[in-house]
């Protein structure tokens, strides 16, 4: 996805709420919605309250490239927000520095989209924590809205190394003290990304270089992938959940997540949200901008990813769906429930939830698996 317009980026910045590195606090509806189970077969109840903490890390071994008038500099600064299962009653807001729930939980690294920040994704991250994952979300250079010189999709491939560094930090003595003894290191880790973050998740899984054997599965939420050649997806069989939305105006489902699912070796699951949009995965309950076009041949993200293919499959742009707009909370609920079932199957070795979802007939989404 192209970096957002200045006006829309300002909305993102206003919505961030917390400074980078501060503990993120989700609105009450974020945790409540994930916790409310009903007769719907896709409603997987939350089992935990949610806590939050933060860390501020820099990888000194790699350089941050120049960005506009901002020169290149040593190190990659990665302030992170962390959401985790907490002790106490489910529902309500994420509580900063809350006691961690008993047990050990898998690691999930979240990658924000272009012009994003972890705070803009507090809803989906807190949902995943309520569903049993320790979620780490960083402000990634250069795609973070808070980047010196402004956000850019140039050099997004460098975030593969950032993910390995974050996993190293979390799976070592650098782990924030309250989480010690509560991270299941035997489970490796998974990556979930949205938009440009979904592209980075695909790189982590399938790029021919830089693969981390600890990576067990990825969740690609409306990630730009039409510029990847078919053989890109044949590199290795990393389990993939590709999530698209029929009314996504920025990363059309048909030539991005649907195509990624079709080309992946498997195991893979495709979930398409009927009436879903691109931006409603974030905490912003707003329509996709009609003045932006999906990634094309000359956009920075496509040019950055040119080592893995061309952008020929990005055109023609498919028309958006006409289904009724999906409710903001419902879109995030469904996304989290799909991700939880998929990751439980491929990270925790507990496939019952995924089997139930695939067998259900939910009118709000279509599902395929292979």
Image (cartoon, helix red, strand yellow):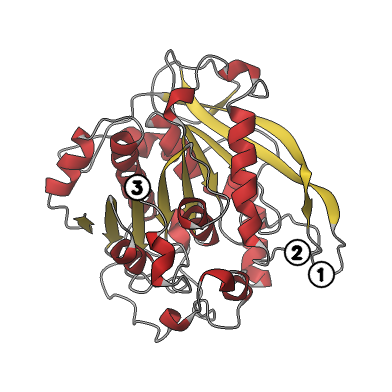
Q: Quadrant of the N terminus?
A: bottom right
The residue beneath circle 3 is 239
Give the SS element for disc 3.
loop
- Residue 28 location in percent, x, y? 46, 36
- Residue 303 location in percent, x, y? 61, 75
Task: Report whether 314 appears left or right of 52.
Answer: left
Q: Is residue 266 above or below residue 214?
A: below
Q: Is residue 245 visible?
A: no
The residue beneath circle 2 is 150
**Which residue is at the front of the view, 79 or 46?**
79
- Most distant residue in the bottom direction: 316
- Residue 304 location in percent, x, y? 62, 70
Specify the label residue 68 is tagged with.
1
Tell us which disc is closer to us: 2 or 3: 3
| Residue in view at x 19 percent, y 44 percent | 357
CA separation in Å, label 2 and label 1: 8 Å
């Amino acid at each position: 996805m192209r970096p957002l317009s200045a006006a829309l980026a300002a909305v993102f910045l206003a919505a961030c709420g917390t400074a980078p590195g501060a503990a993120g606090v989700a609105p009450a509806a974020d945790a409540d919605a994930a916790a409310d189970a009903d007769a719907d077969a896709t409603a997987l109840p939350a089992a935990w309250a949610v806590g939050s903490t933060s860390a501020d890390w820099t990888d000194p071994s790699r350089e941050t490239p120049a960005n506009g008038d901002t020169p290149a500099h040593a190190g990659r600064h990665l302030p992170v927000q962390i959401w985790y299962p907490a002790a106490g009653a489910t529902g309500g807001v994420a509580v900063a520095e809350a006691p961690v729930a008993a047990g050990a939980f898998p690691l999930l690294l979240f990658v924000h989209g272009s012009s994003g920040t972890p705070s803009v994704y507090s809803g989906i991250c807190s949902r995943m924590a309520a569903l049993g994952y320790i979620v780490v979300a960083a402000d990634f250079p250069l795609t973070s809205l808070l980047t010196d010189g402004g956000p850019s999709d140039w050099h997004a491939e460098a975030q593969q190394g950032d993910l390995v560094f974050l996993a190293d930090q979390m799976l070592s003595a650098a782990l924030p003290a309250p989480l010690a003894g509560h991270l299941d290191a035997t489970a490796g880790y998974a990556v979930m990304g949205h938009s440009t973050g979904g592209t980075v998740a695909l790189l982590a899984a399938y790029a021919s270089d830089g693969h981390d054997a600890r990576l067990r599965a990825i969740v690609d939420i409306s990630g730009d992938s039409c510029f990847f050649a078919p053989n890109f997806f044949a590199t290795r069989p990393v389990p993939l959940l590709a999530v698209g939305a029929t009314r996504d105006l920025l990363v059309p489902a048909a030539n991005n997540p649907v195509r990624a699912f079709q080309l992946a070796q498997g195991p893979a699951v495709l979930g398409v949200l009927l009436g879903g949009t691109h931006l409603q995965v974030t905490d912003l309950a707003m329509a996709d901008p009609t003045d932006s076009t999906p990634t094309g041949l000359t956009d920075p993200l496509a040019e950055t990813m040119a080592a893995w293919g061309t952008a020929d499959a990005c055109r023609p742009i498919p028309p958006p769906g006409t289904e009724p707009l999906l409710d903001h909370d419902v879109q995030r609920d469904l996304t989290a429930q799909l991700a939880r079932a998929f990751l439980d199957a491929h990270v925790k070795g507990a496939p019952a939830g995924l089997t139930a979802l695939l067998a259900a007939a939910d009118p709000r989404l279509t599902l395929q698996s292979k």
